[in-house]
Image (cartoon, rainbow, N blue to C red):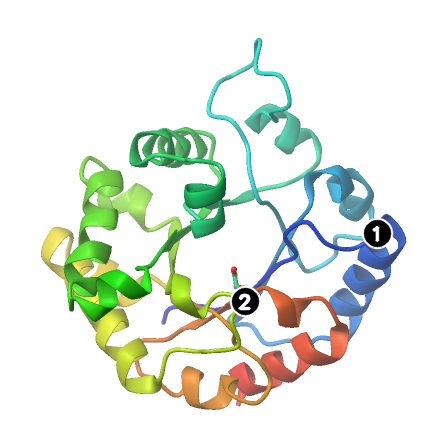
Amino acid sequence: MRKKILAANWKMNLSLQEAKELFMKYNSLLPQADNIDYYIFSPSIFLHELRVVKGKLILGAQNFYPEKSGAFTGEISISQLIDAHVNAVLIGHSERRMLFNESDELIKQKVDFSLQNGFNVIFCCGESIEIRDKKEHINFVRNQLEVVFSHIKATDFSKCVIAYEPIWAIGSGRTANEKEIEEMHSAIRNWILKKYDVSTSQNISILYGGSCNGKNAKSIFSCPNVDGGLIGGASLTFESFNEIANKLQV
Ligand code: PGA
């Protein structure tokens, strides 16, 4: 059975004190079950402090640079993340693609590099509203997967989680409806089936992200091909994240 996953993307938010308090509450108070994993993507500067209280949570980085070391001012390497006991990375988020001009080529290098180093990857994909209006969203997302994973073998792909995040739903308060979400998630699972095999397609967790909150989480998680969520704004307080976690568990 594939895992249910709830991932918090704190983005560039919180003070160190707030992050530690929130992390400790997540660690001790979120509902626990064998088939649920919680990933916390914290600002990198807090990772060393959080590893001390890590507990059951999977600590993740929002970014890194896919080179061993060297003259890359401002960047963080995978071995520096390993030092901080991090073993998951978020790759392909639309904010990194759009605000920091991350290309498919760089994203592909990041996926390769993290898999070579044994990291779990949460790979984000999703279309803009213009692409959806032209009804090209399915092909667009399939292509985002194809360019990055074309050469990746099933054993490596099985260490990845896919997060579908329509750009128009991120931080906008407007979430995709169940029909739109299930259409895309089943298209992604089908793409995995065609490229790999039945067991890979059945075992990969596919998350939804984009204005997910305690009110809409239940209907989002009721979609058969949704295995959890990638949560931005609503991961910044324990109450709202916990509310979503409770919807995932039922
Ligand atoms: P949001 O962000 O939940 O605030 O829409 C989701 C994300 O960007 O991962």
Disc sitting over residue 84 in the figure: none
Say if residue 137 shows up in the picture.
Answer: yes
Quote the CA–CA distance across marks 2 and 1: 20 Å
Q: Amino acid at mark 1?
A: Ser
Front-most of residues 107 and 176: 176
Reading the image, the residue beneath label 2 is 171
The spot of residue 152 in percent (x, y) is 24, 38
Residue ranking furthest to the left: 194
Front-most of residues 162 and 175: 175
Quarter of the picture containing the N terminus is bottom left
Q: Is mark 2 within 8 Å of ligand 1?
A: yes
Pointer 1 local density, CA inside 10 Å: few below 14, some 14–19, many at least 20? few
Residue ranking furthest to the top: 71
Give the answer, above or below, for where 105 lies relative to 5.
above
Left/right placement of residue 144 relative to residue 72 reads: left
Q: What residue appears at the point 38 percent right and 37 percent down from the top-left corner?
A: 111
The tally of labels here is: 2
Reading the image, the residue beneath label 1 is 15
Q: Amino acid at mark 2?
A: Gly
The spot of residue 165 in percent (x, y) is 40, 63
Q: Secondary structure at mark 1?
A: loop
Front-most of residues 208 and 190: 208
Left/right placement of residue 203 relative to residue 16 reads: left
Q: What residue appears at the point 78 percent right and 38 percent down from the top-left corner?
A: 48
Q: Secondary structure at mark 2?
A: loop
Q: Earlier in the sequence, mark 2 or mark 1?
A: 1
**CB atoms of marks 2 and 1 within 8 Å:** no
The spot of residue 195 in percent (x, y) is 13, 51
Q: What residue appears at the point 44 percent right and 78 percent down from the top-left corner?
A: 175
Left/right placement of residue 1 relative to residue 238 reads: left
Pointer 2 local density, CA inside 10 Å: few below 14, some 14–19, many at least 20? some
Left/right placement of residue 34 relative to residue 220 reads: right
